[in-house]
Image (spheres, rainbow, N blue to C red):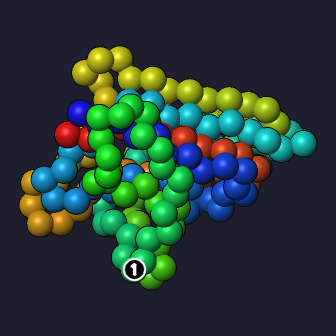
Protein backbone atom coordinates (compact mmCIF):
# COMPACT_ATOMS: atom_id res chain seq x y z
CA UNK A 1 0.00 0.00 0.00
CA UNK A 2 1.30 3.44 -0.91
CA UNK A 3 0.44 6.66 0.87
CA UNK A 4 0.57 10.15 -0.66
CA UNK A 5 0.00 13.74 0.41
CA UNK A 6 -1.36 16.39 -1.93
CA UNK A 7 -0.96 20.04 -0.94
CA UNK A 8 -2.18 23.33 -2.34
CA UNK A 9 -0.73 26.39 -0.61
CA UNK A 10 -1.80 30.00 -0.22
CA UNK A 11 -4.62 30.26 -2.73
CA UNK A 12 -7.62 32.54 -2.99
CA UNK A 13 -10.41 30.04 -3.67
CA UNK A 14 -13.27 30.78 -6.03
CA UNK A 15 -16.67 29.74 -4.68
CA UNK A 16 -18.28 26.89 -6.58
CA UNK A 17 -14.93 25.72 -7.99
CA UNK A 18 -12.69 22.91 -6.74
CA UNK A 19 -9.70 23.87 -4.61
CA UNK A 20 -8.27 20.38 -5.10
CA UNK A 21 -9.44 17.24 -6.90
CA UNK A 22 -8.42 13.62 -6.28
CA UNK A 23 -9.22 11.36 -9.22
CA UNK A 24 -8.57 7.68 -9.85
CA UNK A 25 -8.34 5.74 -13.08
CA UNK A 26 -10.19 2.48 -13.69
CA UNK A 27 -9.34 -0.34 -11.27
CA UNK A 28 -7.26 1.90 -8.97
CA UNK A 29 -8.64 2.44 -5.49
CA UNK A 30 -7.79 5.46 -3.36
CA UNK A 31 -8.86 5.89 0.25
CA UNK A 32 -8.80 9.39 1.68
CA UNK A 33 -7.49 9.13 5.24
CA UNK A 34 -7.16 12.80 6.12
CA UNK A 35 -7.77 16.26 4.82
CA UNK A 36 -7.52 19.74 6.18
CA UNK A 37 -7.32 23.42 5.45
CA UNK A 38 -6.16 26.52 7.20
CA UNK A 39 -6.64 30.26 6.83
CA UNK A 40 -3.97 32.82 6.08
CA UNK A 41 -6.06 35.97 5.77
CA UNK A 42 -5.09 39.11 7.67
CA UNK A 43 -8.75 39.93 8.35
CA UNK A 44 -11.72 37.84 9.44
CA UNK A 45 -13.37 36.11 6.46
CA UNK A 46 -16.27 33.68 6.85
CA UNK A 47 -15.65 30.48 4.88
CA UNK A 48 -17.55 27.26 4.21
CA UNK A 49 -15.71 24.37 2.56
CA UNK A 50 -16.95 20.92 1.61
CA UNK A 51 -15.52 17.59 0.48
CA UNK A 52 -17.85 15.91 -2.02
CA UNK A 53 -17.91 13.38 -4.82
CA UNK A 54 -18.17 14.43 -8.45
CA UNK A 55 -20.87 13.10 -10.75
CA UNK A 56 -18.79 14.08 -13.79
CA UNK A 57 -15.00 14.43 -13.70
CA UNK A 58 -13.30 17.37 -15.36
CA UNK A 59 -12.14 17.32 -18.97
CA UNK A 60 -9.10 18.64 -20.76
CA UNK A 61 -5.57 18.87 -19.43
CA UNK A 62 -5.21 18.68 -15.65
CA UNK A 63 -3.11 21.12 -13.69
CA UNK A 64 -1.20 18.89 -11.31
CA UNK A 65 -1.04 19.75 -7.62
CA UNK A 66 1.97 19.11 -5.40
CA UNK A 67 2.21 15.44 -4.33
CA UNK A 68 4.74 13.70 -2.11
CA UNK A 69 5.05 10.10 -0.94
CA UNK A 70 4.31 9.73 2.73
CA UNK A 71 6.06 6.36 2.86
CA UNK A 72 8.63 4.67 0.67
CA UNK A 73 6.46 1.73 -0.49
CA UNK A 74 5.20 3.39 -3.65
CA UNK A 75 7.11 5.03 -6.45
CA UNK A 76 4.58 6.45 -8.89
CA UNK A 77 1.10 7.31 -7.76
CA UNK A 78 -1.81 6.25 -9.95
CA UNK A 79 -4.34 8.78 -8.66
CA UNK A 80 -4.34 12.34 -9.96
CA UNK A 81 -4.21 15.26 -7.51
CA UNK A 82 -5.22 18.29 -9.56
CA UNK A 83 -6.11 21.91 -9.04
CA UNK A 84 -8.08 22.58 -12.26
CA UNK A 85 -8.90 21.32 -15.76
CA UNK A 86 -8.32 23.15 -19.04
CA UNK A 87 -11.70 22.54 -20.65
CA UNK A 88 -14.46 21.77 -18.15
CA UNK A 89 -14.44 21.64 -14.33
CA UNK A 90 -15.94 18.64 -12.47
CA UNK A 91 -19.66 18.55 -11.71
CA UNK A 92 -20.23 18.06 -8.01
CA UNK A 93 -22.93 15.82 -6.53
CA UNK A 94 -25.52 17.46 -4.28
CA UNK A 95 -24.67 17.27 -0.61
CA UNK A 96 -21.26 16.60 0.88
CA UNK A 97 -19.19 13.88 2.51
CA UNK A 98 -17.97 16.55 4.92
CA UNK A 99 -18.53 20.27 5.26
CA UNK A 100 -17.98 23.00 7.81
CA UNK A 101 -17.89 26.73 8.27
CA UNK A 102 -14.66 28.30 9.48
CA UNK A 103 -12.75 31.58 9.56
CA UNK A 104 -9.84 32.21 7.22
CA UNK A 105 -8.18 34.52 9.78
CA UNK A 106 -6.13 31.68 11.26
CA UNK A 107 -8.88 29.04 11.35
CA UNK A 108 -7.73 25.43 10.95
CA UNK A 109 -9.82 22.38 10.04
CA UNK A 110 -8.49 18.80 10.21
CA UNK A 111 -10.48 15.64 9.51
CA UNK A 112 -8.89 12.28 10.27
CA UNK A 113 -10.76 9.09 9.40
CA UNK A 114 -11.22 6.42 12.01
CA UNK A 115 -10.07 3.02 10.70
CA UNK A 116 -12.59 1.75 8.15
CA UNK A 117 -14.23 5.18 7.72
CA UNK A 118 -11.97 6.47 4.94
CA UNK A 119 -13.62 8.02 1.87
CA UNK A 120 -13.14 5.53 -0.97
CA UNK A 121 -12.69 6.46 -4.62
CA UNK A 122 -12.90 3.54 -7.03
CA UNK A 123 -14.28 2.87 -10.47
CA UNK A 124 -14.18 -0.69 -11.76
CA UNK A 125 -15.22 0.41 -15.25
CA UNK A 126 -13.30 2.12 -18.01
CA UNK A 127 -13.83 5.63 -16.63
CA UNK A 128 -12.64 7.57 -13.62
CA UNK A 129 -14.01 8.62 -10.25
CA UNK A 130 -13.19 11.71 -8.22
CA UNK A 131 -13.85 13.78 -5.16
CA UNK A 132 -12.98 17.37 -4.48
CA UNK A 133 -12.48 20.03 -1.84
CA UNK A 134 -14.65 23.00 -2.80
CA UNK A 135 -15.27 26.49 -1.45
CA UNK A 136 -18.98 27.17 -0.92
CA UNK A 137 -18.64 30.53 0.87
CA UNK A 138 -15.67 32.85 1.22
CA UNK A 139 -12.55 33.72 -0.71
CA UNK A 140 -9.99 34.19 2.06
CA UNK A 141 -6.39 33.14 1.42
CA UNK A 142 -5.99 29.54 2.57
CA UNK A 143 -4.12 26.24 2.07
CA UNK A 144 -5.48 22.69 1.58
CA UNK A 145 -4.15 19.13 1.90
CA UNK A 146 -5.34 15.55 1.31
CA UNK A 147 -3.71 12.31 2.45
CA UNK A 148 -4.67 9.08 0.70
CA UNK A 149 -3.65 5.46 0.26
CA UNK A 150 -3.62 3.74 -3.12
CA UNK A 151 -4.29 0.03 -3.53
Q: Is residue 71 left or right of residue 136?
A: left
Question: Could you say where residue 150 lies in the image, as x and y percent from the top left?
Answer: 26, 41
Tell me residue 151's x, y (percent). Answer: 20, 40
Up the image or down, 2 lies above or below 12; here it is: above
Q: Residue at x 50, y 69 (%)?
A: 63
- Name the residue rendered at 42%, 40% in the picture: 69
| Name of the residue lying farthest toward the left | 125
Quadrant of the snapshot with the N terminus = top left
Residue 17 picture location, percent across and down: 55, 62
24 and 5: which is toward the camera: 5
Q: Nearer the viewer, residue 25 or 4?
A: 4
Q: What residue does disc 1 label?
A: 60
119, above or below 140, in the image? above
Q: Secondary structure at mark 1?
A: loop
For image coordinates 49% across by 26% down, the residue present is: 111
Q: Residue at 59%, 44% (x, y): give it.
A: 144
- In this image, 144 relative to 23: left or right? right
Considering every residue shown, the one lying at the far right of the view is 43
Going by the image, does 107 lie left or right of 5? right
In x, y percent, where is residue 15?
63, 59
Q: Is residue 113 visible?
A: yes
Q: Is residue 138 visible?
A: no
Q: Nearer the viewer, residue 66 or 62?
A: 66
Left or right of 93 on screen, residue 68: right
Dot 1: few (<14), some (14–19), or many (≥20) neighbours within 10 Å? few
Judge whether 129 appears above or below 147 on screen.
below
Amino acid sequence: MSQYTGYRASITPATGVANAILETVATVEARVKEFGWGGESTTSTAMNTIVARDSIVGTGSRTAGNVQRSNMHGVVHAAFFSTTYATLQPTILAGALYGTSWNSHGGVIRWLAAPGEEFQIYDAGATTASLEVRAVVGVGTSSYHLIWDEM
